[in-house]
Image (spheres, rainbow, N blue to C red):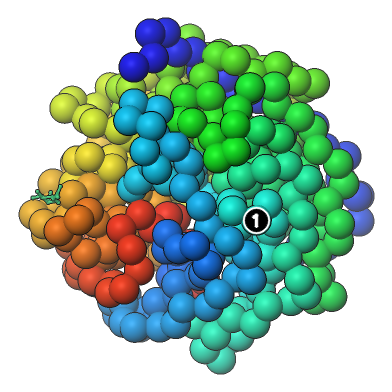
Amino acid sequence: MVQRIQALSILFSLLLTANAVPYGKDHDIGNAKAAYFIPKNAKNAVVALKINSDGTLCDGSITPTGGAGESGIFGATNMPAGPDSLFSQSPLTIAGNFLFTVNPGSNTLSLFSIFRGDATKLTPIGNPVSTLGEFPVSVTTHPYHNTVCVANSGAKAGVACSTYSYNGLSPMDGLREFDIGQTTPPVGPTNTASQTFFNEDGTQLLTTFPCGKVSMRGTQSSPAGTAVLFGVTNIPGSSDILVTDASFGAAILSVSPSGTGTTANILKIANQAATCWATYSSVIGTGFVTDVGVNRLVEVIPSTGALGRVFNSHNGNPGMVGLAPSGKFVYALSPGNQTVETAVAVFDVVTGGKITELQNFKVEGVGRSSQDMVIFYD
Ligand SMILES: *[C@@H]1O[C@H](CO)[C@@H](O)[C@H](O)[C@H]1NC(C)=O
């Protein structure tokens, strides 16, 4: 195992067009229509599950992306990694009714349009475009502009950006390299890119790494007390971010206008295994994190900088990865394992001031290393 690990959050300031068009809403109120994730598959695909009006899930569709999936290598065993096969959060994202997904095995980004009449119907727009690097793992957009950026974690690592429209994706603009000394596929989870994301106002692009080996143009910082920075969510109305740390739980960081992250709160989660995924519910104003090795939903309260409610699920899933809010619900993906199927658990985090589990929807035939959770609203 790694002896000493250091965390970095890294910033690139992007120049964005002043007359950028809002392409979508990024709040979680509205009518949720579908939930998406990517299964682990040599032929990469998007799984779409229909969301009923009561918040429960039912069957949907599987749409090929036109690119290839691939797993990273788990450093401790030298075997293909799983269930967290990309070592990342957000390999899939939505802006308005555009859906984007990385293709880690073919170094491309795919774009789809979501059909408003049936959000499980995805139509490819153009061909996948090169991400200019190798092993893309995380993609981000922002509602204030039509820039989409992708982090690559392989031998050619770095971030590249493109713009999108109903005509498709433009060619990526250039690779801002990360010098992380990786191979393709990368050996992780340390020394890989975890997540690239825009700050709340869309003026900064930040990337988290659970490692100490990055050098690049741009600002980098290693917030005190953090070690294995992983998935991130912005805290609306502030320049703070909620970030998971696989070594102890979660942290709230303040990000300065120059892109330096400093630690505001360290939130140790007792008996955690690998807390790696985070989301924020604007309906109740709190964050939620999941752990791939412990089957529970943990709330983080940014206003007090403390942990909130903890919901231990007894649905038989081994743990949870990607999660997303929608109204009073939080949807969380369980990648399953050799004996337990992939499932999406639906939690009501509002009614009665309690967290309750509404459904554990089993998804057949998608392998055991699915990633991400993204919700489309109409
Ligand atoms: C899969 O997860 C379940 C629930 O945590 C556990 O009981 C089971 O032993 C796991 N199976 C394997 C093969 O690890």
Determine whether 256 is above or below 38 in the image.
above
Determine whether 118 is above or below 96 in the image.
below
Determine whether 59 is above or below 325 in the image.
below
| Residue 353 seen in the figure | no
Residue under the image location 34 percent in, 83 percent down: 59
- Type of the residue with mark 1: Ser
Residue reaching furthest bottom? 117
Residue under the image location 57 percent in, 46 percent down: 137
Q: What percent of the width, then of the height, locates residue 33?
A: 46, 79
| Label 1 sits on residue | 106
Location of the C terminus (image quadrant): bottom right
Q: What percent of the width, then of the height, locates residue 252?
A: 45, 26
Residue under the image location 65 percent in, 82 percent down: 123
| Residue 61 seen in the figure | yes
Q: The residue tagged with tag 1: helix, strand or loop?
A: loop
Q: What percent of the width, then of the height, locates residue 114?
A: 61, 79
Asked whether 118 or 192 is in front, the reply is 192
Location of the N terminus (image quadrant): top left
Q: Is residue 15 left or right of residue 99?
A: right
Q: Residues within 10 Å of mark 1 (few under 14, many from 20)?
A: many
